[in-house]
Image: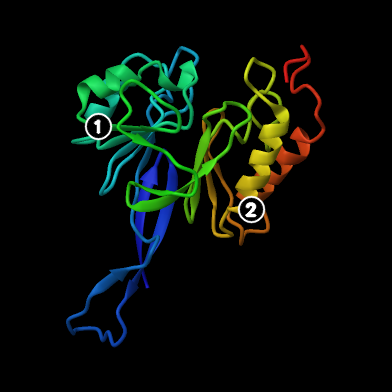
Amino acid sequence: MISSVVILGGVTLQRQLTISEGYDEGEDWTVYPSKQSYTMDIHAVTADAEVFTCNAYLVSGDRPVLIDAGAMPGVADIINNTVDNLEAVYLTHQHTDHVAQLDAVLDQFDAELYAYNDHPRRDGTLVDGDTVEIGDELFEIVYTPGHASDHVAFVGDTRVFSGDVVVYNDGAFDDGSFGRTDMTGQSREQLIKSLQRLLERLPQTVEELYAGHGDIYRGSPEDDTTDSVKTIIERALMRAERREPKYSNNWF
């Protein structure tokens, strides 16, 4: 085995590459990447925002994709300085903090827009159970309403882009939280079912959680010293099932 390593913000992400059978040092050999062996850079392009925004993630690779556009002015320029082209924008949902800069991004790039609900500039529909290519990997679309009626998450073999259905920390909880459900059109009961659905369709190999707010979380299911991503989602579900307000001001 050999390793492909990339350093992102001080964090090392490593993927293994498999050498073909029969390899002998000094002879010709071929490297065949396994299903999840590609190096895939993930850039949190709204990390330096001074306005309220979601975490927008730019994923480079064979198919550069933006997960949500965020609300930070100038995000299109950051994308332009990071990748040569942008092929698609995938929306987890259409709350303002996730789409305020969408027109600016689409105006600057010849990128296709994919969303669950209708949008004037939508090129394709995100359908529960379908798969999409993000970077160098395939992700399953999981419909996860509750925080928003059009909410979806993108579930891959090693990472999840969860939007706001589940976050690692958000000021209410530090190690497994969920999107608010106290505003018009939101539903705690639907969100609970969405978390259950997400757990049912979560591969055991997932070790990274990229949420719409809060910190990125990394926890290997094989590492007993840290919580797995599954554990974080289970804890969020447990807290949601209490059906209590998330915040002291009675916001749910």
Q: CA distance from mark 1 to mark 2?
A: 32 Å
Identity of the residue drawn at 52% across and 29% down? 150
Q: Is residue 218 left or right of residue 111?
A: right
Image quadrant of residue 64? top left
Report the disc number at residue 200: 2
Residue 29 coordinates in the image, percent (x, y): 21, 79
Query: Under tag 1, what secondary structure?
Result: loop
Q: Amino acid at mark 2?
A: Glu
Identity of the residue drawn at 43% across and 25% down? 47
Q: Amino acid at mark 1?
A: Ala
Q: Quadrant of the N terminus?
A: bottom left
Q: How many marks?
A: 2
Report the disc number at residue 111: 1
Q: Can the viewer see residue 227 in this picture?
A: no
Identity of the residue drawn at 64% across and 49% down? 199
Residue 164 coordinates in the image, percent (x, y): 57, 30
Q: Nearer the viewer, residue 17 or 167?
A: 167
71 in relation to 224, above or below: above
48 in relation to 220, above or below: above
Residue 27 coordinates in the image, percent (x, y): 18, 85
Q: Quadrant of the C terminus?
A: top right
Instruction: Classify mark 1: residues with Cα within 10 Å, few (<14), some (14-19) or many (20+).
Output: some
Q: Nearer the viewer, residue 130 or 251?
A: 130
